[in-house]
Image (spheres, grey):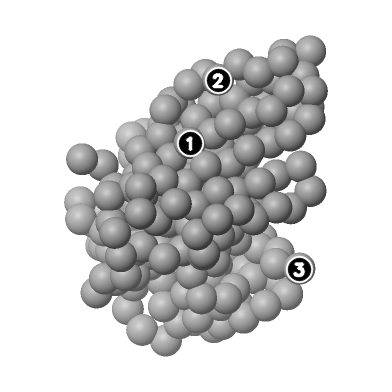
Amino acid sequence: QKEVEQNSGPLSVPEGAIASLNCTYSDRGSQSFFWYRQYSGKSPELIMFIYSNGDKEDGRFTAQLNKASQYVSLLIRDSQPSDSATYLCALFVYSSASKIIFGSGTRLSIRP
Amino acid sequence: GAVVSQHPSRVICKSGTSVKIECRSLDFQATTMFWYRQFPKQSLMLMATSNEGSKATYEQGVEKDKFLINHASLTLSTLTVTSAHPEDSSFYICSAEKVEETQYFGPGTRLLVL
């Protein structure tokens, strides 16, 4: 099982609707979770980070974390064409060489 | 803010030459920086973790003698691709850890080896 799993998509959502992106992970000890957005040909950009169970809201973005079920999600309200990108889920892994593990990303397409 | 820069943004070189890529944290100090590689339509692949003042930690399968990393200061890490070959052509991205566990990415360097 991969450490971080995401549906590769593409996920197509009409403009103005809510886009829901999901991610599951295998390391029960993980405490820190991140969502990055990556436009084609560009480097990733940090969107949200979440450490505690529950919801965390920032503008149109809401991150949801459920450690018992080992999933983290990202909701994008009032989706805009500019939200079309690949969204990477990531988590921090504590080990001899602590690092962030990235999922393979979900391609999101917002159709006008 | 948390701004990370990379230079150059794009480089084309001949096979067999070496290429140096710089990664700088502009408005914060970073004891830890990371180097990633990304091939088209693939996810990020962590190459190595760069620690200021000590040797880099390389991921399995990454040749440390080919990808030389130097983290000489709290704001600068460099990646040198030695004796580059066409298969090394890729998008190289660095990130810097601002606060514990949170990474901010540079804009990336696109390398093309002819």
Can residue B21 be seen by looking at this rendering? Answer: no
From the viewer's side, name the closer residue of B110 and A34.
A34
Mark 3 or 2, closer to the camera = 2
Cα–Cα span, label 1 and label 3? 28 Å
For image coordinates 54% across by 70% down, the residue present is B97
| Residue corresponding to mark 2 | A11
For image coordinates 43% across by 40% down, the residue present is A23
| Residue corresponding to mark 3 | B1
| Residue corresponding to mark 1 | A22
Mark 1 or 3, closer to the camera = 1
Q: Callout 2: residue from which chain?
A: A
Q: Identity of the amino acid at label 2?
A: Leu
What is the crowding at mark 2: few (fewer than 14 residues within 10 Å), some, or many (at least 20)? Answer: some
Q: Identity of the amino acid at label 3?
A: Gly
For image coordinates 32% across by 70% down, the residue present is A94
**A84 left or right, relative to B81:** right
Q: Identity of the amino acid at label 1?
A: Asn
Same chain, labels 3 and 2: no
What is the crowding at mark 1: few (fewer than 14 residues within 10 Å), some, or many (at least 20)? Answer: some
Q: In the structure shown, which secondary structural element does the residue marked by tag 2 occupy?
A: strand
Q: In the structure shown, which secondary structural element does the residue marked by tag 3 occupy?
A: loop
Cα–Cα span, label 1 and label 2? 11 Å
